[in-house]
Amino acid sequence: MVTHIHQKAMLVKLKIGMWGAETIDPNVTRQVTEQHSAAGDAGRWHKKLLQSPHLDLYRSLVSQARRYHKDQTLPWDDNSTRIMPVMLFDDYVEGANVIFRAMTEAAGALVDDYEDAIEREQKRQGTMFDVSDYPKANLVASRFYHDLSFWPIPKSDDFRITIDAEAEAEIKANVTNAVEARIEEAMSGLWRRLYETITALRDNLDQGSRLYDSYSENLIDLVDMLPAMNLTEDPHLAKLTGDLQLSLCANNMDDFRDDNKLREQAVGKANKALKAIEGFGAFQKAA
């Protein structure tokens, strides 16, 4: 079992909801299919109910929140539950709350403007406008929400029911094995993510015509989190983290733009790091 994993990490799930501001218009669908002599199941007319900068902003913030959640955590299952290193908890919550506050403001602004926006839609939609397509403002407001749930990583000792001793031992072993497998998958995913981030930076530096700050920033941000994300205390990952801090993360894109030789050296360092990663067993399992 990974040593002290239950003290090093927890599970976190992000839930986000919003009003989609779309509906299927059966009347227009029927008119279009009849106009084109098409079968009734040939298509459906999706009506966009609202044009709103507040809704556009909320959608953008939802994408930002989900990307942030993914970047700051490690995978656990296919249901958006992720592993949160305890060392990153405070920073994670602080960053998430910044996005959540902006989401709340955008949703509030949309609801405040809702009745006026519906009036504007009468002109935009013309004869397709149907006021019955629009829920009440309070119902729309309730569709916007965000929630973070945290809970401990499962432990075999948490299984407490009265059954046959042999069956109980088997179930506890299954819990332990499942947790170990999830942690192994998470670390393999981290190696893959590191490899892809270095590759992206290397390729951008190598082509040289246009250098993007984001490639360097992405690697610096990831390397800063590696000590906390190294849940298995992998010595290879710990050493590589230190090497990257002293090499590829010691410069930014402005440095590389101003010095072709420095850029060429960085490409060589990136290739060296990638070759080293390719030799580690954890990465080979992720590939």
Image (cartoon, rainbow, N blue to C red):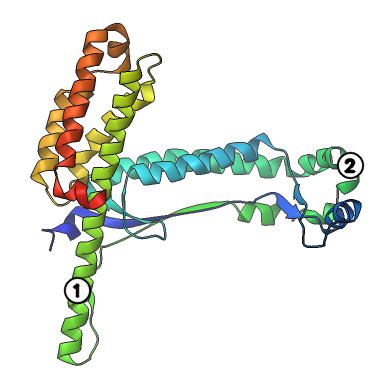
Q: Where is residue 183 in the image (x, y as percent from the top left)?
A: 22, 57
- In the rendered structure, the answer to whether residue 110 lies left or right of residue 149 reads right
Give the farthest residue toward the bottom: 164
Q: Position of residue 132 (x, y in %)?
A: 83, 56
Residue 82, which numbered label?
A: none
Q: Where is residue 281 in the image (x, y as percent from the top left)?
A: 15, 49
Mark sitting earlier along the chain (2/1): 2
User: Residue 58: which quarter of the image?
Assistant: top right
Circle 2 residue? 126
In the displayed structure, would residue 56 be above or below residue 151? above
In the displayed structure, would residue 227 be above or below residue 216? below
Q: Position of residue 260 (x, y in %)?
A: 27, 9
Local SS, label 1: helix
Label 2 – label 1 distance at C-alpha: 62 Å
In the displayed structure, would residue 241 be above or below residue 128? above
The kind of residue tagged 1 is Ser
Q: Viewer-proximal residue, 258 or 43? A: 43
| Label 2: how many Cα within 10 Å (few below 14, some 14–19, many 20+) | few
Circle 1 residue? 156
The kind of residue tagged 2 is Gly
Q: Is residue 38 among the parts visible in the rendering?
A: yes
User: Residue 57: which quarter of the image?
Assistant: top right
